[in-house]
Amino acid sequence: MFSLSEENYLKAIFHLERAYPTGVSTNALADEMSTKASSVTDMIKRLSEKKLVAYKKYQGVKLSKSGRETAVEVIRKHRLWEVFLVDKLGFAWDEVHEVAEQLEHIKSDKLIKELDRFLDFPKRDPHGDPIPDSEGNFAISNKVLLAELNKGESGICIGVKDSSPEFLQYLDKNNIALGQLIVILEKESFDQSMLINLNGSELKISNVISSNLYIKTS
Amino acid sequence: MFSLSEENYLKAIFHLERAYPTGVSTNALADEMSTKASSVTDMIKRLSEKKLVAYKKYQGVKLSKSGRETAVEVIRKHRLWEVFLVDKLGFAWDEVHEVAEQLEHIKSDKLIKELDRFLDFPKRDPHGDPIPDSEGNFAISNKVLLAELNKGESGICIGVKDSSPEFLQYLDKNNIALGQLIVILEKESFDQSMLINLNGSELKISNVISSNLYIKTS
DNA sequence: ATTTATTTTTAGACAAGACTAAAAATTTTA
DNA sequence: TAAAATTTTTAGTCTTGTCTAAAAATAAAT
């Protein structure tokens, strides 16, 4: 059984490994955890002694098999709780993160098994991120950023890159929701802004927006 | 906002105040918290500095107004989560305590407000204990121990004093459940054992059992 | 290939919360 | 009421997780 801090570090390393496949740097981790590099070094040493990460001085850190399993389990719990908060308790999708950050550390195999069943084995959380199953397998999908598509292409909105309340509220205001079909009507080559079709209505969006929306192309 | 340890101490003091109305002793608290008297003294000093308890050396400890409010809020959360686990996730009433001990420390006003609504504002937890409302008011009831009743008297089972899995499983095995009418057919003056009527069937129970069952007399 | 800048680690300190051992206060017993 | 037993507090230490300041290693720049 691991501490709350250990679990949070493992989760952060997991998320950063995509951007740093050769090893997550101390500073990147300090930044992600909003702490100091020296604190990170301390914690990495502890995680390394527990065989949760592979660590060589000045070389960054990588998750071990058991470290990755633990991280994925925490992410599974986080996303299941987010579904609970939105589907059952009526939270908006920009209100769930902080609470799920706490709930993800509750320890009970039965709890998470029964919660999963109660929610009818959801595959994605309210932001469109895939929920690992009890074996730790992620649903993979050919998702791309909306910004990578061109005029005439289309796809289903399946997630957000930035999940800040500000961005999520912008999406709500403009009726952009998960599951929605987006068709690119125009793409301005100068600033990459787009004119898109959403359920019949048209919307002009900047590159900042399209760079934070994940799309599943058919 | 208080730490997990602080909340647990406040809760323990609250529960012990009924048995020690003049002040909860350091040893009683150490026993309840499964810790050492010296650790209790340390913590009491911290709680006292934060004005959560009134404390005089060698005189035991009492909750202040804000300390009692915090304790009641934690108890409210604990009992609401127990209802959730039993009613929504299918836990048995002897499986909920450990998980609720963790869930009771999640901090989110909206969460507990929406959970309460989702559960349809329950008044009692699965063990029959009253759930404080959002103002901290307990439903009071004229509950007595079954052992205090005599031949011919009757009442509704509304709670247990001992909530160990062993006792709860004994009750399940003998079909004694919350809400059930219990009529005392015989009471043996020698050992206080009883013959009771439960929904038509008769059952012989010892004083150990009757001393751990709460009854609401009409 | 040195100097400069950046990143990372070490060293030492701190707070929370717990522990052991011993001292002080209180209560009980004779 | 003095001795014995119990309860409670103090003193000092430990672990976890954090910090600052300084040293060491690596990377970048002249």
Image (cartoon, coloured by chain):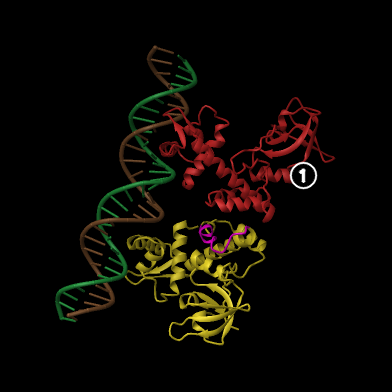
Chain colours: A yellow, B red, C green, D brown
Q: Nearer the viewer, residue A196 or A102?
A: A196
Relative to B134, does residue A14 appear above or below in the rendering?
below
- Whether residue C9 sits left or right of residue B181 in the image: it is left
Q: Which range is magenta?
A: A89-101
Q: Nearer the viewer, residue A209 or B181?
A: A209
- Any magenta on residue A97? yes
Q: Position of residue B164 (x, y in %)?
A: 63, 43
Residue B73 visible? The answer is: yes
Please state the horizontal and vertical placement of residue A195, each as a whole percent of the image.
Answer: 53, 81
Q: Quadrant of residue A83?
A: bottom right
Count of residue discs: 1
Q: Secondary structure at mark 1?
A: loop
Mark 1 neighbour density, 10 Å: few (under 14) some (14–19) many (20 or more): some
Q: Position of residue B28 (x, y in %)?
A: 51, 33
Query: Is residue A142 at all visible to an observer of this figure?
Result: no
Quadrant holding the C terminus of chain B: top right
| Position of B7 relative to A166 (above/below) | above
Q: Nearer the viewer, residue A201 or A162?
A: A201
The residue labelled by disc 1 is B175
x then y, percent, for residue A110? 62, 58
Q: Which residue occupies 70% across, 32% down?
A: B142
In the displayed structure, B130 sits above or below A88; it is above
Specify the subunit that label 1 lies on. B
Residue A172 vertical placement versus B180 (above, below): below
Three-letter amino acid code of the residue under disc 1: Asn
